[in-house]
Amino acid sequence: MPPFSAEHGALIISRSIYWNGRLILQEDPGFKGQKTFDCSITLDAALASQDERWRTLIHEALHACSAGYVRDDFETFRGWEEGVVEKLQRLLRPQILARLGVNADDEVFRRAEDGHLYNRYLAALEDLQWLTGMSEQEFYVDLLGVPIKARIGHVLSLANAMSGGRRAEFIRTFSKSNAVLKGDARWSLLRLKKNTGNG
């Protein structure tokens, strides 16, 4: 596998990175990639020789740049983290791969992202981003720099600068989006069963 440096993504978004440099290849882990809370990154070994690995590596490396990346907050506000990181992965991937000198087939990434589990988070966040008037990169990099548990309040505070009608539309949209973005109890239950050997 060609060398991977998470610093490329951190430099593009001007964020510190919390990664211990360990990239673990694991056989059949039950996920494609995972940024663990001990600051290592685990990748499904089956992806190691495939172009698709780049989207997974970049996604997990961006978790390492995320403010307030702690387990309880992540599980409570899962969409506020996974949606932000996945959108930034898609936005920044071309720049990161260019810096790495990687020439990968975009069709591979498109297939992986069509129908992706996190697309619902992206749709919810995109509705909010559009109403703020901020550019995509500005909106998502801004959120990445806000601790996960504070992102709801931070986004709500953006409504303060809006006029009455627009503010009301933003609050309505926020309510719908937040229902999608906050933690999914079913996901947490499945995780608990897996960790206790019951699932």
Image (tube, helix red, strand yellow):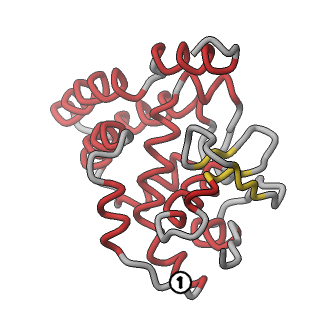
From the top left corner, tell me how far across and down residue 139 is, in percent: 42, 53
Q: Is residue 134 above or below residue 117?
A: below
Left or right, residue 46 beside residue 127: right
Q: Is residue 151 above or below residue 142?
A: above
Say which amino acid is labelled 1: Val
Image quadrant in which the C terminus is located: top right
Nearest the viewer among 140 and 47 is 47
Using the rendered view, name the quadrant where residue 110 is placed.
bottom left
From the top left corner, tell me how far across and down residue 196 is, in percent: 70, 14
Nearest the viewer among 133 and 2 is 2
Q: Residue furthest bottom?
A: 101
Q: Is residue 19 above or below residue 69?
A: below
From the top left corner, tell me how far across and down residue 54 is, in percent: 53, 67
Q: Is residue 178 above or below residue 63?
A: above
Identify the residue at horizontal 54%, vertical 75% (top origin).
96
Identify the residue at horizontal 27%, vertical 42% (top origin).
123
**Residue underneath mark 1:** 102
Q: Residue furthest left?
A: 165
Nearest the viewer among 53 and 86 is 53
Number of other residues with Cα within 10 Å of mark 1, as a class: few under 14, some 14 to 19, many 20 or more: few
From the top left corner, tell me how far across and down residue 43 is, in percent: 64, 53
Identify the residue at horizontal 56%, vertical 48% (top origin).
144
Identify the residue at horizontal 24%, vertical 30% (top origin).
173
